[in-house]
Amino acid sequence: MNKSKEEAFAMYNQVPFAFPHALEYIKYYTHKYNFPLIVTDLSNSKPAEQELRINGIMGTYYNRWCTRVYKVSPSKSFYKRYNLNGIEEVMGETKYQSSRRAKKDPNKHLSKKSTNTFKIYKSLPIFDMKEEEMYNLMEKHEIKINPTIKKFDIHGCMYCPMRNPKYYYNLKQEHPEMYKQCQQWRKEGSKRKGEKERTKEYYWFSKGKGSNLSKKMRETHPEYIEIM
C-alpha cells in the first residue's frame, strides 16, 4: 500500500517452484472484491533450472536464494520503477505458523529492503490471529480455502528442500506429475559445482550414518526411502 497516495493493491511474485494452482487462487480472491493485482514473473529472464545450476539447492532458511531472486528483488524493482517511496507492505503472516515467525515485529516498522534514500515499511495486521479465527473470517467473507492447504495442510511452494519425507512421499503417491517436476529441479540443483569443482547429489533428506531421517522413522516408515 502506498501511504503517500492512500492507494492499496495486491502483489504476487510468481515463484517457479510454487504449486500449479497458486496464481489462480490469488486471482480468485483478489478479483472477488475487484482488488487491484500486480503479478511479477521472472521465469523467462531467470529460469528455475538456470538459477538452480548457479545457486544449488536452497538448503536452509538463510540460504533461500529463491526468495531473494523471485520475491524480494522484483518487489523492490517495482517500487522504485513507480517511485513508491514510503510504501507499506501488509503481510499475511501469523505467529502460529512457526517459531521463527512468532519472533517477528507485528507493528509497522522499517523493512530490511529499505535503503538510506528509499523507504519500505512492513506490518503484520493478522499476526495474533489464530488459525480458527482466520478460517472464520474467510467463511464470513465467503472466501474459499487455498487448495494447497486443503490438500497438503501447508503454505509455501510445491518444491522446497525444507519439506519433510512424509510430504514428498505423499506427493509422489497422490500427484506423481508434481513429484516428477520436483525431482527434475532437485537434479538441476545437484549440478552446481562445490568448492572442489565437484558436483554434489542432493536428496530430500540424508540417509545412512548421520541421517536427519531418525532411526525410528526409518524403521516405522521404510517407504520413505522410496522417494530417494
Image (cartoon, rainbow, N blue to C red):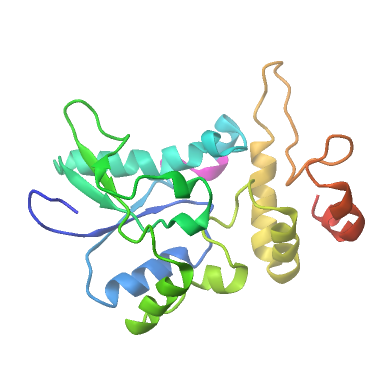
Q: Is residue 193 left or right of residue 70?
A: right
Q: Is residue 209 left or right of residue 160?
A: right
Asked which quadrant contains residue 138, the reply is bottom left
Q: Is residue 41 left or right of residue 102?
A: left
The answer to whether residue 156 of the structure is visible from this angle is no
Count of labels shown? 0
Question: Residue lying farthest top?
Answer: 196
Q: Nearer the viewer, residue 112 or 156?
A: 112
Residue occupying image coordinates x 34% and y 73% = 29
Residue 91 placement (x, y as % from top left)? 33, 54
Instruction: Report if residue 47 lies within the magenta region.
Output: yes
Most common SS among magenta residues: loop
Residue 133 placement (x, y as % from top left)? 41, 73
Instruction: Report if residue 11 lies within the magenta region.
Output: no
Residue 187 placement (x, y as % from top left)? 70, 42
- What segment is highlighted magenta in the picture? 45-49
Q: Nearer the viewer, residue 113 or 168?
A: 113
